[in-house]
Image: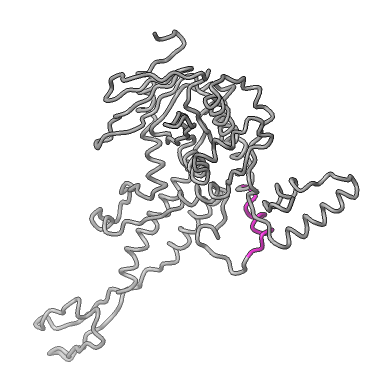
């Protein structure tokens, strides 16, 4: 029996169908499989299609931050939720959640019971799941996920998530329901950078980043076509005898020596070469696009392949990636809230008891440092810790040092 507050599975099916193309577009940009439209006015389409360029800046913009977000543990784990994650291949699970959320703005975690009554966690990308979110708790009031599709991409196995139960459909027809003692749907969103306007977050692949990558790809295509004329400059011959044999253009291009005889009037031909186009404007255009993309994503030109002459220290790298560090700290806060919701509902399902969400307020997600410490940084932190502990005994502990450096010391 459908409640008045429920939207229903048909509503969620249409909602997923509406948002799926935009998610698929961002996955295409990440997988470097998106083909740009031919918008040039000077190069014929058949020539441009021969020089299709491929560029992975969007993937670089995602991976450069996602690879730095390494989940460590839950602090004050009073409900022993880390045991649940340890049983679900955490090295792959956490990375998969973070990467999917970076690409599509959010990822979903489907919580279920296994054959041996263990709690299973499955990551479902945003192109196959949606729901109605509670902006206060970050949990869903109802959810929908496509668990499998047929060879034509149509939904085959579907799940409709409600408080205390999950309904399953196959081929569009209802199959069964599985009851639980959990007061929320067992589909949890893990959202990247949510706000009041976009509760399901924002993607790391922005429209501006897509534009700069497209601009750079068009520049590479033009440069590649121009390089053909740059490699083989066009030549010309003036004053040849009209009765002479036609000149073979390909032979004239690749031959090391050509012979031209005087005409009947004693005139000799004039040989010339057209000015070759310069490749410099394309290099400058590509660097301009790289600078725009780097500013959009918090990267540097070094990250995009424009290597500087002098190698940078860890401190210099951190200083140049200040925007990336701030984006990483923000991502840790938003993604950590989603992972805590996953831990909360997983504990409810494991213990077959509906805990209050307020009971998990002391449990905090902890992440490894965004930048690994080198020897110089360890020395500076050590000196600072000594001075602070001299001023306030016991202020800096081993756990504090680990949070700063990522190095786990002795007991």
- The residue at 30%/29% (across/down) is 155
Asked whether, in this view, residue 216 is left or right of residue 351, the answer is left
- Asked which quadrant contains residue 253, the reply is bottom left
Q: Position of residue 344 (x, y in %)?
A: 58, 27
Quarter where residue 22 is shown: top left
* Residue furthest front in the image: 116
The one nearer the camera, 160 or 274, is: 160
Prevailing secondary structure of the magenta residues = helix
Q: Relative to 252, does residue 138 appear above or below in the rendering?
A: above
Q: Is residue 366 left or right of residue 214?
A: right
Does 319 lie within the magenta span? yes
Residue 104: horizontal and vertical position, in percent? 45, 38
50 and 364: which is toward the camera: 364
* Among the 4 quarters of the image, the one containing residue 310: bottom right
Residue positioned 23% across, 84% down in the render: 255
Residue 285 belongs to the span the image colors magenta: no
Q: Position of residue 115 (x, y in %)?
A: 42, 31
């Amino acid at each position: 029996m459908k409640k008045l507050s429920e939207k229903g599975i048909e509503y969620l099916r249409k909602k997923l169908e509406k948002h799926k193309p935009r998610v698929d577009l961002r996955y295409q940009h990440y997988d470097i499989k998106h083909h740009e439209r031919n918008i040039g006015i000077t190069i014929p389409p058949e020539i441009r299609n021969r020089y299709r360029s491929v560029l992975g800046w969007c993937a670089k913009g995602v991976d450069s931050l996602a690879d730095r977000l390494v989940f460590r543990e839950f602090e004050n784990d009073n409900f022993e939720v880390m045991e649940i994650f340890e049983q679900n291949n955490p090295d792959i699970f956490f990375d998969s959640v973070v990467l999917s959320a970076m690409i599509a703005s959010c990822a979903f975690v489907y919580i279920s019971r296994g054959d041996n009554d263990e709690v299973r966690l499955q990551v479902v990308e945003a192109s196959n799941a949606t729901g109605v979110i509670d902006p206060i708790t970050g949990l869903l009031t109802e959810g929908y996920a496509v668990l499998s599709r047929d060879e034509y991409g149509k939904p085959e196995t579907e799940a409709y998530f409600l408080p205390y139960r999950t309904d399953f459909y196959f081929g569009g027809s209802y199959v069964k329901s599985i009851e639980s003692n959990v007061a929320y749907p067992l589909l949890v969103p893990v959202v990247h950078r949510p706000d009041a306007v976009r509760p399901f977050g924002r993607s790391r692949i922005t429209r501006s980043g897509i534009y700069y990558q497209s601009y750079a790809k068009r520049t590479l295509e033009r440069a590649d076509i121009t390089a053909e004329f740059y490699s083989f400059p066009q030549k010309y011959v003036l004053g040849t005898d009209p009765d002479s044999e036609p000149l073979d253009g390909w032979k004239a291009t690749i031959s090391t020596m050509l012979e031209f005889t005087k005409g009947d009037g004693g005139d000799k031909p004039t040989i010339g070469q057209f000015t070759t186009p310069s490749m410099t404007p394309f290099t400058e255009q590509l660097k301009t696009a790289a600078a725009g993309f780097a500013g959009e994503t918090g990267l540097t030109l070094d990250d995009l392949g424009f290597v500087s002459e002098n190698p940078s220290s860890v401190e210099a790298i951190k200083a140049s990636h200040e925007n990336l560090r701030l984006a990483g700290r923000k991502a840790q806060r938003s993604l950590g809230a989603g992972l805590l919701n996953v831990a909360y509902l997983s504990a409810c399902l494991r213990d077959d008891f509906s805990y209050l969400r307020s009971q998990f307020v002391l449990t905090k997600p902890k992440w490894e440092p965004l930048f690994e410490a080198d020897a110089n940084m360890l020395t500076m932190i050590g000196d600072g810790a000594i001075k602070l502990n001299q001023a306030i005994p016991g202020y800096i502990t081993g756990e504090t040092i680990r949070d700063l450096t990522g190095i786990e010391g002795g007991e």
